[in-house]
Amino acid sequence: MSPIATVITVAATAIVIGASLAGVHDAPRHSYPSIPAPSSPEPGMALTKAYRTAPPHVAYATFSAGCFWGIEEAFREAPGVVATMVGFTGGHVANPSYELVCTHTTGHAESVRVEYDTDKTSYNKMLDLFWSIHDPTQLDYQGPDYGDNYRSAIFYHSPEQRELAIASMKRLQATPEYANDKIVTEIQPRQAFFRAEEYHQQYVEKGGVAECHPRGHQN
């Protein structure tokens, strides 16, 4: 497929998602083409304490849910998570620095890339954790952190992940907890992911404190 055809395909996918999801902040920020699945573990990812080597059957997920320090730690503690790294995705600038992303001019979101053991856990469980550790009704902010880099977003790695993410969001929106609040989470194809600086990686595990976002929806 030509690069032009690839970009058109991704743009069309984003439009379909926007048309099919009531209550989703669906305007795609940018249209990086989807890229091939990474090797296991992907370069730059750090194994969790539960794994010394990657297991034979793994899959990847990418989430944005506010400040990536606490988000990464929550996933690193989850059963079946093999490895993680934090970085930036969803924008239009290649290899951005943290400082540049914080100017809100790159379109990138602080994100966590997760590798998980499909013999031990599932994408649905990854989604359940994602929803539980932030407030998906907050548009372009989480708690005290404001800006599009703190937006709620799911970057799916396959058509199956797309369908599971849509179904999961619809179920959540239908619960009493969200009866009066619109979920604004973006659901988009996986885009180019740029690893953040080393001092951001496994920040909490190294002794840092992450109190930068709410744990779940606040009524």
Image (cartoon, grey):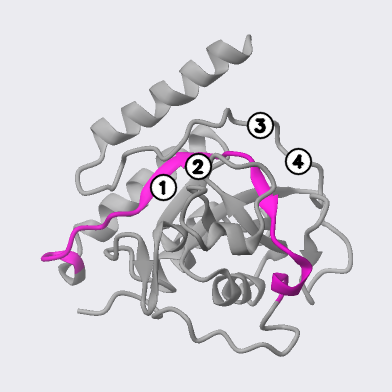
Q: Is residue 197 magenta?
A: yes
Q: Which residue is mark 1?
A: 165
Q: Which residue is mark 4?
A: 38
Residue 87 location in percent, x, y? Answer: 64, 58
62 or 4: nearer the viewer: 4
Placement of the C terminus among the 4 image quadrants: bottom left
The stretch in magenta equals 178-202
Q: Dot 2: few (<14), some (14–19), or many (≥20) neighbours within 10 Å?
A: some
Of marks 4 and 2, which one's residue comes earlier in the chain?
4
Which element is circle 3 on?
loop
Residue 154 location in percent, x, y? Answer: 46, 50
Distance (Cα) linking label 2 and label 3: 15 Å
Distance (Cα) linking label 4 and label 2: 16 Å
Q: Is residue 212 magenta?
A: no
* Residue 35 image label: 3
- For badge 1, the amino acid type reads Ala
Distance (Cα) linking label 4 and label 1: 21 Å
- For badge 4, the amino acid type reads Pro
Which element is circle 1 on?
helix
Distance (Cα) linking label 1 and label 3: 19 Å
10 is higher (above) or lower (below) than 130: above
Q: State how many labels appear.
A: 4
Which residue sits furthest right? Answer: 52
Q: Which residue is mark 2?
A: 161
Which element is circle 4 on?
loop
